[in-house]
Image (cartoon, grey):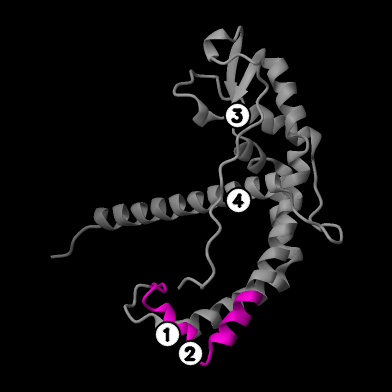
Amino acid sequence: MKSLSKLFVPASLALVAVATAAPAAAQVQGRIGTADVSRAIINTTALQNAYNAVNTTYSAQLETRRTKQQELETLLQPFDTNGNGQLDEAELPAVQNSPSFAQLQTLETEIANVNAQVNNARIFAVEQILAQYPAAVQEVAAAQQVVVVLQPEAIQYAGEGADITPQITASLNTKVPNVGIVPPQNYRPSQQGAQIFQEIQQFLILAQLRQQQAAQQQQQQQQGEQPQGR
């Protein structure tokens, strides 16, 4: 059951490339590499440790969110008249005119506040790593003799070895071995940090879906291999 709030759709972030002013790749004299900023950050030890620490440090807030989300879904269930698991436009007027509408709005606000607190802790961690990303790109590019670094989707074809993302992650592991997860007072995430965070969240969701699909396929194969009784 989806809440009434609109989902934030992550925008793709254009990598600030180490590039020349040449208008076409054909004019570049030297090796061209690709790097995915989100993938480079998500694979760092610092971010993985930070995410685990957030789950522990903010466990009370996460439990509060889970409880309130369940309460919200229970209140919204009667309005899902077609039983599709979400509220359609035709079903919204009944929600807005119901006696529980104020309670629904309060729950959504409370859930949003918890989400902001937890997500700000994660974005704060992302931003600390992101601050060292340009230096890591320059370090790896110099070592690999790369003169231009582009986002993978910016080119149609890249040969083997063009992707230097793993090397950038290794550089970041050295430059940022640990990060904090408690933002300072009155902390406001930067637009770039928020965008990278959203891309990381999307990556994690897709990875989880792939794991679930792989587990289901494996289970189906195992069931198909079991001997059939007479």
Q: Amino acid at mark 4?
A: Gln
SS under mark 4:
helix
Residue bounds of the magenta highlight: 85-109
Q: Name the residue: 34% across, 77% down.
A: 83
Q: Amino acid at mark 1?
A: Ala
Residue 148 in the image, given as x and y percentages of width and height: 63, 18
Place residue 67 in its image quadrant: bottom right
Front disc: 3 or 1: 1
In magenta segment, residue 93: yes
Residue 193 in the image, given as x and y percentages of width and height: 70, 46
Question: Taking 26 as reference, is 62 above or below it?
Answer: below
Front disc: 1 or 4: 1
Q: Name the residue: 35% across, 56% down.
A: 219
**Closest to the observer, 2 or 14:** 14
Camera sees residue 55: no
Of marks 4 and 3, which one's residue comes earlier in the chain? 3
Identify the residue position indicated by label 4 in the image. 198
Q: Quadrant of the C terminus?
A: bottom left
Identify the residue position indicated by label 1 in the image. 94
Which numbered disc covers residue 98? Answer: 2
> Residues under labels 3 and 2: Cα distance?
51 Å
SS under mark 3:
loop
Q: Amino acid at mark 3?
A: Ala
Q: Name the residue: 76% across, 64% down.
A: 57
- Asked whether the beta carbons under mark 1 and mark 2 sit within 8 Å of each other, the answer is yes
Residue 184 in the image, given as x and y percentages of width and height: 86, 57
> Residues under labels 2 and 4: Cα distance?
34 Å
**Closest to the observer, 27 or 31:** 27
Question: Along the horizontal axis of the image, is 120 left or right of 15?
Answer: right
